[in-house]
Image: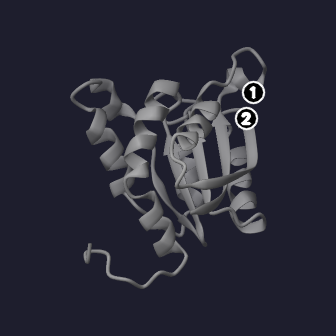
């Protein structure tokens, strides 16, 4: 499946060059292990944890660039500067709560603090937006959950009318 995608890392320290972004590259590496997806990485960017900047970037990538998929990493915790879910929620046309629920559930027994991540997911126009945690390990684990239904979901967003439960 062909996908035009963007990776948006949200980190004050990485945006200032104080800390290397390892989570954005972990997203791309995860796709490299799944050759069924032919991904064109249209955008890769690091921004500070600023809600208005995040909102503007998500809208631009979805509306102007018409990406199929935007994956964010970072800014999903309970710290005061973690505003990625709020910025994302503000741009979505439709939220899909089952995606982050599945991600949190997959890690809950191994990593109790995974329940603290506040990431959300949903659709803006024809773009799927998914918030991932900021740690590379959590990114890789959450991506494996996402791969379980990503192709089906993107086909649905593109207008596939086949039955969801017929498989």
Q: How is the image coloured?
A: one colour
Q: Secondary structure at mark 1?
A: helix
Tell me the SS state at disc 2: strand
Give the total number of marks visible in the rendering.
2
> In the depicted view, which residue is nearer to us: 21 or 115?
21
- C-alpha span from label 1 to label 2: 6 Å
Label 2, on which residue?
A: 46
Q: Position of residue 103 (x, y in %)?
A: 35, 43
Label 2 crowding class (10 Å Cα cut-off): few <14, some 14-19, many 20+?
A: many
Residue contact between numbered discs 1 and 2, judged by CB atoms under 8 Å: yes
**At 32% across and 75% down in the image, what residue appears?**
164
In screen coordinates, is 106 left or right of 41? left
> In the drawing, what numbered circle is on residue 84?
none
Residue 31 vs 99, above or below: the answer is: above
Question: Please, is residue 27 above or below residue 137 in the view?
Answer: below
Percent x, y of residue 27: 57, 38
Residue 4 visible in the displayed image: yes
Q: Report the residue that reaches farthest toward the front.
A: 35
Residue ranking furthest to the top: 18
The residue at 69%/19% (across/down) is 20
On the image, which quarter does residue 111 sit in? top left
Sequence-wise first label, 1 or 2:
1
Left or right of 167? Residue 63 is: right
* Residue 126 % position (x, y): 60, 71
Q: Is residue 157 above or below residue 103?
A: below
Q: Is residue 73 visible?
A: no
Looking at the image, residue 36 sits to the left or right of residue 60; the answer is left
Q: Which residue corresponds to mark 1?
A: 15
Looking at the picture, tell me which residue is in the foreground, 28 or 73: 28
């Amino acid at each position: 499946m062909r996908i035009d995608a963007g990776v948006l890392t949200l980190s004050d320290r990485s945006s200032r060059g104080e800390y290397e972004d390892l989570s954005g590259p972990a997203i791309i590496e995860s796709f490299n292990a799944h050759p069924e997806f032919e991904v064109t990485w249209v955008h890769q960017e690091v921004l500070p944890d600023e809600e208005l900047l995040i909102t503007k970037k998500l809208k631009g990538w979805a509306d102007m660039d018409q990406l199929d998929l935007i994956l964010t990493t970072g800014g999903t915790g309970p710290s005061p500067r973690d505003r990625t879910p709020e910025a994302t929620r503000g741009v979505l046309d439709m939220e899909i709560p089952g995606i982050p629920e599945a991600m949190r559930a997959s890690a809950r027994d191994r990593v109790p603090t995974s329940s603290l991540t506040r990431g959300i997911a949903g659709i803006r126009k024809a773009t799927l937006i998914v918030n991932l945690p900021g740690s590379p390990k959590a990114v890789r684990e959450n991506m494996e959950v996402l791969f379980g239904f990503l192709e089906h979901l993107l086909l649905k967003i593109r207008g596939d009318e086949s039955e969801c439960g017929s498989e």
